Image (spheres, helix red, strand yellow):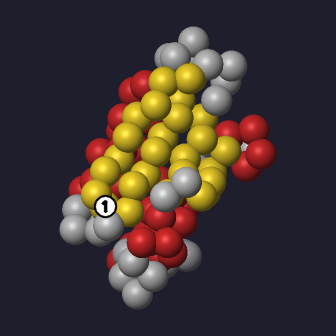
Amino acid sequence: MARVAIEYCTQCRWLLRASWMAQELLSTFATDLDEVALLPGSGGIFRITVDGEQIWERKTDGGFPEIAVLKQRVRDRVAPDRDLGHADRRD
């Protein structure tokens, strides 16, 4: 089972965004995730890791991830054979 950590900036008030992403990941990967942690930070941080490996960083990746992209990156690490349905389709 994997651990996802979402570190968010409290000064920027990104808790709601971080918690929504956590909810989406827990709903999609209910049997593959052991934990989704919300980690308060500062200085404009918005970083997502899976088992300590960074999969998204706001400054490096250019903003916030689309939820489909985030799910694909998490899936690639925790359940590579899983089909995400519409989130995998590029229309």
Mark 1 is surrounded, within 10 Å at the Cα level, by few (under 14), some (14 to 19) or many (20 or more) other residues, namely: some
Residue visible at 48% across and 24% down in the picture: 40
For image coordinates 38% across by 62% down, the residue present is: 2
- Foreground pick, 38 / 14: 38
**Which image quarter is the N terminus in?**
bottom left
Give the percent coordinates (x, y) of residue 10: 52, 17
Residue 84 coordinates in the image, percent (x, y): 38, 75
9 to 23, vertically: above or below = above
Q: Viewed as shown, does residue 91 lie left or right of 36?
A: right
Is residue 56 among what the camera can see?
yes
Query: In front here: 80 or 70?
Result: 80
SS for dot 1? strand
* Quadrant in the picture for residue 33: bottom left
Vertically, is 5 above or below 71?
Answer: above
- Residue 70 at x, y = what percent? 51, 58
The spot of residue 39 in percent (x, y) is: 46, 31
Look at 50% across and 57% down and name the residue there.
50
Residue highlighted by disc 1: 33
The single residue placed furthest to the top in the displayed view is: 11
Q: Amino acid at mark 1?
A: Leu
**Looking at the image, is 70 positioned above or below residue 91?**
above
Tally of numbered discs: 1
Q: Is residue 25 above or below residue 74?
A: above
- Is residue 66 among what the camera can see? no
Q: Quadrant of the C terminus?
A: bottom right
Quadrant of residue 52 in the image?
bottom right
Please report the residue visible at 59 percent of the width from the left and 58 percent of the height from the top. 53
Question: What is the residue that sits farthest to the bottom in this orientation?
Answer: 81
User: Image check: 43 left or right of 26?
Assistant: right
